[in-house]
Image: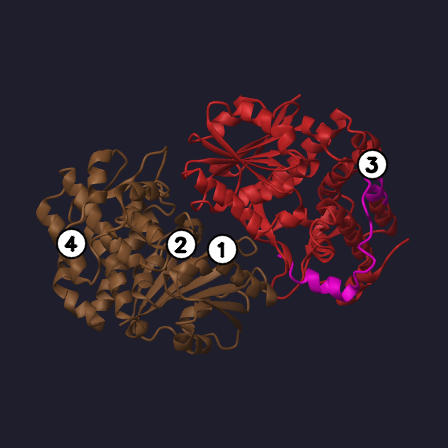
Chain colours: A red, B brown
Amino acid sequence: MTRTLEVDLGDRSYPIHIGPGLLNDPVLYRPHIRGRQVMIVTNETVAPLYLAPLHEALAGLDVREVVLPDGEQYKTLEVWNRIFDALLDARFARDCTLVALGGGVVGDMAGFAAACYQRGVAFIQVPTTLLSQVDSSVGGKTGINHPAGKNMIGAFHQPLAVIADTETLDTLPQRELSAGLAEVLKYGLIRDCAFLDWLESHMAELLSRDREALAHAIRRSCEIKAQLVAEDELESGQRALLNLGHTFGHAIETAAGYGNWLHGEAVGAGMCMAADLSARLGWLAEADVERVRRLVVCAGLPTEPPAELDAERFRALMAVDKKVLDGRLRLVLLTALGEAVISDTIDDEPLLATLSARRP
Amino acid sequence: MTRTLEVDLGDRSYPIHIGPGLLNDPVLYRPHIRGRQVMIVTNETVAPLYLAPLHEALAGLDVREVVLPDGEQYKTLEVWNRIFDALLDARFARDCTLVALGGGVVGDMAGFAAACYQRGVAFIQVPTTLLSQVDSSVGGKTGINHPAGKNMIGAFHQPLAVIADTETLDTLPQRELSAGLAEVLKYGLIRDCAFLDWLESHMAELLSRDREALAHAIRRSCEIKAQLVAEDELESGQRALLNLGHTFGHAIETAAGYGNWLHGEAVGAGMCMAADLSARLGWLAEADVERVRRLVVCAGLPTEPPAELDAERFRALMAVDKKVLDGRLRLVLLTALGEAVISDTIDDEPLLATLSARRP
């Protein structure tokens, strides 16, 4: 049942293990732990569920933990600093290993702390949400938020392994399951129309947590992500396709206040907006826009940005996105279902129309 | 008069320009600035002296500045965050350039901000102190302090160019000139006895700021540093020799409270302690220890740690050093003047003797 993929990055290649019951398997961790000091970074929600089995897997090592508050609103400089407090309290040396146990917020913060502690130490991702298993734990993007913009402070720092235990999804709140499906849909939309078809016909199974269906969705998502990351680790080109819906989505998250919209919810609405804009530019058929919206609705996600976010403010928030270069906004748009492009030549008129449109 | 060295790091190679009157020369900056947005990071002491000429050199670009308080005690997470506030207030994009104008603290903080802003942007070092011209601006080590240890949070992030204007040393306080000489002596001690001889016979000229003598000392220091960095960018081996005196020195700085001892002063005392320990181990002649101490005294630097810092506390502070691996302290010691080694097999007895010894 366990499947192992590889992210091919030369001497920084690493495995992604996907399957049930992996979290407490010592064999998966040991090859990646160099010294004896291990710091588990987790949060208040995940700790009572999975800290004990993870400790079992790491028995015999000098294992400590730091438990952070749960939520995107805590992905801040101050909370991040608590990881350094814990590492230095315990006198952890440069040959220590950080283990991120939790969702995307924990993984981003722990990974960024690993990137910066003593100018870089080892880390392992143990994602426990659908979103982190299919997206944020793979690829080495780490970071924290600034009040003015999502993920504005961060680093590329690849993990030594990703251990995605699909049984942890049993305890995931339904709202977070839906949020994870946003990123799963993304892979179909940018790269694989056949996968999108499969998702469409298996959405009910996915939402009811059919194990086989979820395992397939996770594997195919990780395959696509691993391929794009291996081709373009530092996002100088095609890796940016993974940001479909994200420039819209980050603006929504910042406007709504971190933690009010889940990241996946904002990406769901953002992908609908990207499809809408693609249609306004004549690149995508109106029927395909409707199909995207239906898929997003079926996944239990919003298709519209907040009513009170007007186009002008929306445009201003998008202007601090990391994909802005030379003052030009760069957006990922669709030319077909399964085919995406990056464009920095989008006129303001259709963009503002998309930003102000609210469909029923 | 201007001499250009190269730090050879493949496609991340960069020039070090050393000479008088370079700070306001537009030609040195332009090849390294990609977009139009430039953020100068400086401090309250340096800004009134050199901000205007630097603005001249960057005329025609969209140039902003962020002015930080001056001193090692401000090399904190909170002050570092002000750089991000400034970058985001001005909506700086990923193709912006940071310019560090000042000493080691400014260079370390600006470089680390460049490493992390939007996961990495360009930066140029314009060092204005002797210490930063001979050491901290070259080699890509960036970071900030934690109350428990110096430079514990940071990154390797190479600049695109180092522009060391030797005329800026005219305004340097004498105490800081001496602090810079500590790092200059270090290069002689670890790698080049002939340079050490030259320093011994030219110390008076250096202290009276003879331009030719200072230019020679800076060039030779940068040559040695550039070579060690090119051979071992991420300090997995010989680059660690550059830390002679630094494990002792960082403990002194942390114990005394950041900003009370200048970094170079702590390194001066630390190098004397490294020589003392080397002699206790039978690796270095007592006459050489005395010669090291005389050189450090002549440079205007302390040779002893603070009287109130007892051996036990000293040992504990050293245990959080970044060179600790597998629980073992690793120290740079001398086997001769001009020859250094890294050892992790030092017995506690001679170490504690060195830590508690106070010579007249």
Mark linked to residue A200: 3
Question: Which picture quadrant has residue B343?
Answer: top left
Quick check: B262 above or below B26?
Answer: above
Quick check: A6 above or below A243?
Answer: above
| Secondary structure under the numbered disc 2 in the rendered image | loop
Left or right of A104, for residue A93:
left
Which residues, given as a range, are shown in magenta? A294-322
Do badges 1 and 3 share one subunit?
no
Mark linked to residue B140: 2
Q: Which residue is mark 1?
A: B77
Does the magenta run of residues contain A302? Answer: yes
Do badges 2 and 3 share one subunit?
no
Q: Nearer the viewer, residue A106 or A229?
A: A106
Residue B223 visible to the viewer: no
Badge 2 amino acid: Gly
What residue do we see at 38% from left, 73% from top?
B23
Left or right of A232, for residue B115:
left
